[in-house]
Image: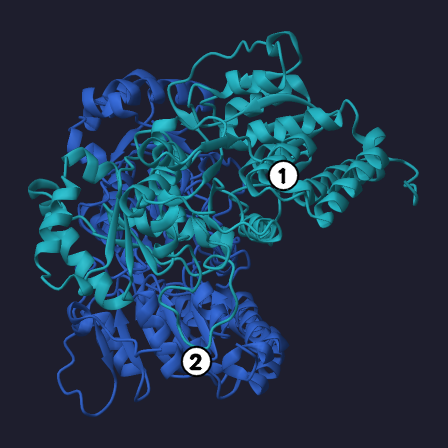
Amino acid sequence: MKTTAKAKAATQNACKLCNPLGACLAFRGIEKCVPFLHGSQGCATYIRRYLISHFKEPVDIASSNFNEDTAVFGGSHNLQLGLKNVTLQYKPEVIGLATTCLSETIGDDVDMILRDYEKLFPDTKELPLMIHASTPSYQGSHIDGFHAAVKATVEKIAEGGQKENLLNLYPNMVSPADLRHMKEILEDFNIPYVLLPDYSETLDGGPWDEYHRIPKGGTTVSAIRKSGKASASIEFSSVLAANKSAAGYLEKKFDVPAYTMTLPIGIKQSDVFFELLEKLSETPLPEKYEDERRRLVDAYADGHKYIFEKKAIVYGEEDLVIAITAFLTEIGITPVLCASGGKSGHLKKRLEKIVPNIDNTDILVRDGVDFVDIEEEAKVLKPDLLIGNSKGYTMSRKNNIPIIRIGFPIHDRFGGQRQLHLGYRGTQELFDRIVNTILEERQNSSPIGYTYQ
Amino acid sequence: MDKLEILEGRKQSVFEKNKDVEAFDISCETTSLSGSVSQRACVFCGSRVVLYPVADALHIVHGPIGCAAYTWDIRGSVSSGPELHRLSFSTDLQEMDVIYGGEKKLYNSLIELIDQYTPKAAFIYSTCIIGLIGDDIDAVCKKVSAEKGIPVLPVHSEGFKGTKKDGYKAACDALMKIVGTGSTEGIGKHSINIMGEFNLAGEAWIIKKYYEEMGIEVVSTQTGDGRVDDIRRSHGAALNIVQCSGSMVKLAKMMEEKYGIPYMRVSYFGIEDMSKALYDVASHFSDNPAILEAAKNIVRREVGEIYPQLMKYRTALSGKKAAIYVGGAFKAFSLIKALSSVGMDVVLAGSQTGNKDDYEGLKEMCDEGTVIVDDSNPVELSKFVLEKKADLLIGGVKERPIAYKLGIGFCDHNHERKIPLAGFVGMENFVKEVYQSVMSPVWQFAPRKGGKS
């Protein structure tokens, strides 16, 4: 299906965030790492606030805190002072440094500044490891920053050598619950693994008796170091270019075979994932997951009539949109609009792999859109459901369309960090929520209010 | 766990009130220390918070997407009519715009958005990058204003050019350009502007009702539930009353200088300060004794209504310890009094933007041993609440997880609150919220209260 919408000059109610946010999130998934933004104080504070509102956890992000002199004379002094202070205060083993529009535009040579800083410490034991990701806010969106940080981390730390029985998993920007699920699966397959990033504990942890400057958890540096010796990498992404991906880098540099696949949501995509694990581990699918799959197939049967030919608008990061589209098409829901604020240029091509001949279907694909664009389409398409992050609530309320909140951010509901999306189990949760949303809608709008469904 | 230390560069911003400290010379009103993880945002944030509630104006953020995305519908400033302020508009600058300049995109965006939304005025916020690429936004604003016939006001809020306070100034400068452009016909002599009141959860309406009941005409509320036309004629008021003085005293001073309108500082938090805010205004209009009579009646009635409840809470809260870390120091004064009225002791009083006089005042008000701090950070705040054994932390979104992680009650007294805390009814809400958090049985599981860690 084709859109008749015309391009706008301004972005209204953006369906994306800026590049440095993604980098900060990824850096939170490395053990003993403090994210550090080279830019204005506001960048760090706004991003902290945005992340805290979703994860409900302390998120400390340092800033070099530019002032007018910094902008004129360069950020070297502020950055070095900031590194020194953050090291004193947080005692990190790693500092994950991401740039902003400000530092990128004045043209700071961050690598050189870091080298100069390192020279000040002849005893390198006093120095945290410093990773630098280039994340100018005027390029791409938060998901690009996320991948940039993961790739920069691997580039900085990974070493090659004799191959080991080890799997790298680059899971994309998923929830702490998803990360925990991935670890459980890999452990059940008995595969030694390096999951990067892993903020399952740092952004969804327990109570403290003392303040933890850096919460425990995260992928260790020693594990990341070994990722060049892994026997394979799996990367969940449909649109990420090989030259921007950690798995792509490791394949090129250390001959670690890269398996790139769509996020495993839905039976078919989860099958791909589990079959890949069976192959790489030479272990058959553990019974537990056979059971989960069986229950899911059974649930599809039990729920199919409630949802068949319902129309949904799916929005969010391109990779998530593609994965959800794959899932919806296997349960009989029509994704009438697949929309993303991101613009890799690959969204439609990748969707065509799932839905051949997409132009001749009822599915409209739009990238680089904002929520006002999506709302305009919604008025014409009249969907039964919106599926995406909580920022769709504004249009949901205005147009009276139920919203199913998934992904990031979820700012107006509780427990977004514990929401599962991946594998048979995550699909089951999503499926149940979708069916229940439809049932609730039916029940509320019915003059009778049936007590059985 | 090693000891939490305060950074060398921060030591002059932290004081503990006791007899040993003779010289109290707190360092404040400076930019944040690089690497300290300040809880402050930036210049842009200061401007955005002051202007945001003007509900019939277009607020367009000129820069890359982040600044607009992170401030979309960020405050609980409610409107009784138009809700244009709840939408997020950005020029969403891309790399090519940064190279070739963003003026054209700004111009096109403004024309497009003004045509679409027909606002009464437009505020154009400059972000960091505009200060570098040298867009002449004043010229663009002038041009669009001439073409569209509405005020189009540049707000010079480049994030790195100072602190949040400089953003307040930039916002006041923009407002001052509208003040005086409307007719003052029909405005009576007992008239006021309510300034520095942002109508969070409808607070401005509560306050306005009190003054109107006293027979006082409210010409404008700035900027809560704000309207451009009201601001235009606000120079016709006889008196400006300013809450949140850090943000809007500047405008009151400009109005005093240009239009001879006197101003007074007030606070609406707690019984004592709320009553004073009514009595002070009544004294100003002493030519009409009925106003004072009415004020007395309101205070008598309202206090009578909430008193029994407060006494109930007082029994439970008496002797509990509170830590306060808020944006403006003036609010801290009120909170100390309000907490004291229910028997609570304040063990920490800090703010993001206080000045020397404010901190001197806080020192006078507080008991021995109270920590007084400017521009603090998570590590310091944690250290203080732990050392001082606080039962409650009052702050904003970024402080909340610190409290909860450590098993401490929390009250959001920042711009995200959904319950009015101003006015007499607000005092009851405030104490109720404090009670509900401090007395919750969930803390029995917190490690600091004997639960497992």
Q: Position of residue B95 (x, y in %)?
A: 26, 25
Instruction: Please determine whether, in this image, residue A84 is positioned above or below residue B372.
Output: above
* Three-letter code for the amino acid on which mark 1 is drawn: Phe
Quick one: which residue is furthest to the front in this view?
A: A162
**Direction from residue B251 to residue A364 in the image, left or right:** right
Q: Residues within 10 Å of mark 1 (few under 14, many from 20)?
A: many
Instruction: Please determine whether, in this image, residue A263 is positioned above or below residue A113.
Output: above
Q: Position of residue B118 (x, y in %)?
A: 44, 23
* Three-letter code for the amino acid on which mark 2 is drawn: Ala
Quadrant in the rendering for residue A17: top left
Looking at the rendered structure, the secondary structure element under dot 1 is helix
Q: Which residue lies under the disc numbered 1?
A: A274
| Chain corresponding to cyan in the figure | A
Q: Which residue lies under the disc numbered 2?
A: B390
Res. B228 in view: no
Q: Give the drawing colour for chain B.
A: blue
Q: Please count the marks in the image.
A: 2
Q: Position of residue B314 (x, y in %)?
A: 55, 84
Along the line of sight, which residue is nearer the eye, B234 or A31?
A: A31
Q: Residues within 10 Å of mark 2 (few under 14, many from 20)?
A: many
**Direction from residue B265 to residue A73 in the image, left or right:** left
Q: Position of residue A94 (x, y in %)?
A: 29, 56
Q: Could you tell me which residue is drawn at 13 percent across and 64 percent down?
A: A123
Using the image, name the chain to which the residue with label 2 belongs: B
Looking at the rendered structure, the secondary structure element under dot 2 is loop
